C-alpha cells in the first residue's frame, strides 16, 4: 500500500492519512505519508477540508438542494449503476462524480460496488 501511496503522491493525486503515535512502529507508514505530502486527517473537519480541496468547494446552499434533488431523482427508487447516471443527468461523468460525492457526504445516497442507492 505504501508503493501505491507513493505513486499517488508522485502523480499529484490527493492522499489522506491518519497519523499515529510517533513511538509506535505500526504508525510509521502513515506518519511517513503525512511527512511526504498526504493530507493528515485528525477529525471529520480535516476530511471535509481535504475533500473540498479535491472536489472543489461545496455548492452554495441553494445549489446543494437542487443538486441533491436531481441526483436523488435520477437514482430512482430502486437505485442504479454509477455508469448510468451521466446519461440520466445529461452531464459529463466528472460532474456526476462531484454531485454524487456531495450527495453521499450529505447522507442522501450511498454508493456500494458501483451501485448508487437512495438513503
Image: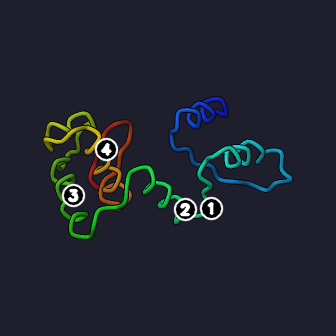
In the image, taking residue 107 as reference, residue 4 lies left or right, namely right
Q: Secondary structure at mark 3?
A: helix
C-alpha separation, residue under disc 3 versus residue under disc 2: 24 Å
Q: Are marks 2 and 1 in contact (CB under 8 Å)?
A: yes
Number of numbered markers: 4
C-alpha separation, residue under disc 3 versus residue under disc 1: 29 Å
Asked whether 11 or 20 is in front, the reply is: 11
C-alpha separation, residue under disc 3 versus residue under disc 4: 12 Å
Picture quarter with the C terminus? bottom left
**In the rendered image, which residue does mark 1 sit on?**
42
Q: Residue at x 34, y 61 (%)?
A: 58
Q: Residue at x 15, y 44 (%)?
A: 89
Report which quarter residue 79 is drawn in: top left
Q: Residues within 10 Å of mark 1 (few under 14, many from 20)?
A: few
Sequence-first disc among 3 and 4: 3
Report which quarter residue 65 is drawn in: bottom left
C-alpha separation, residue under disc 1 versus residue under disc 4: 25 Å
| Image location of residue 107, percent across then percent down | 35, 60
Q: Residues within 10 Å of mark 3 (few under 14, many from 20)?
A: some
C-alpha separation, residue under disc 2 versus residue under disc 1: 6 Å
Image mark for residue 46: 2
Q: Residue at x 15, y 36 (%)?
A: 87
**In the rendered image, which residue does mark 4 sit on?**
97
Amino acid at each position: 500500500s505504501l508503493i501505491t501511496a507513493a505513486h499517488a503522491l508522485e502523480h499529484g493525486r490527493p492522499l489522506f492519512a491518519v497519523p499515529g503515535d510517533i513511538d509506535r512502529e505500526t504508525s510509521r507508514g502513515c506518519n511517513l505519508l503525512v511527512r511526504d505530502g498526504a493530507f493528515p486527517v485528525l477529525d471529520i473537519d480535516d476530511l471535509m477540508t481535504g475533500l473540498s480541496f479535491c472536489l472543489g468547494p461545496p455548492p452554495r446552499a441553494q445549489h446543494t438542494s437542487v443538486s441533491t434533488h436531481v441526483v436523488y431523482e435520477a437514482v430512482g427508487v430502486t437505485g442504479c449503476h454509477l455508469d448510468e447516471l451521466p446519461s440520466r443527468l445529461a452531464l459529463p461523468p466528472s460532474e456526476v462524480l462531484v454531485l454524487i460525492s456531495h450527495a453521499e457526504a450529505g447522507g442522501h445516497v450511498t454508493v456500494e460496488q458501483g451501485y448508487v442507492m437512495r438513503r
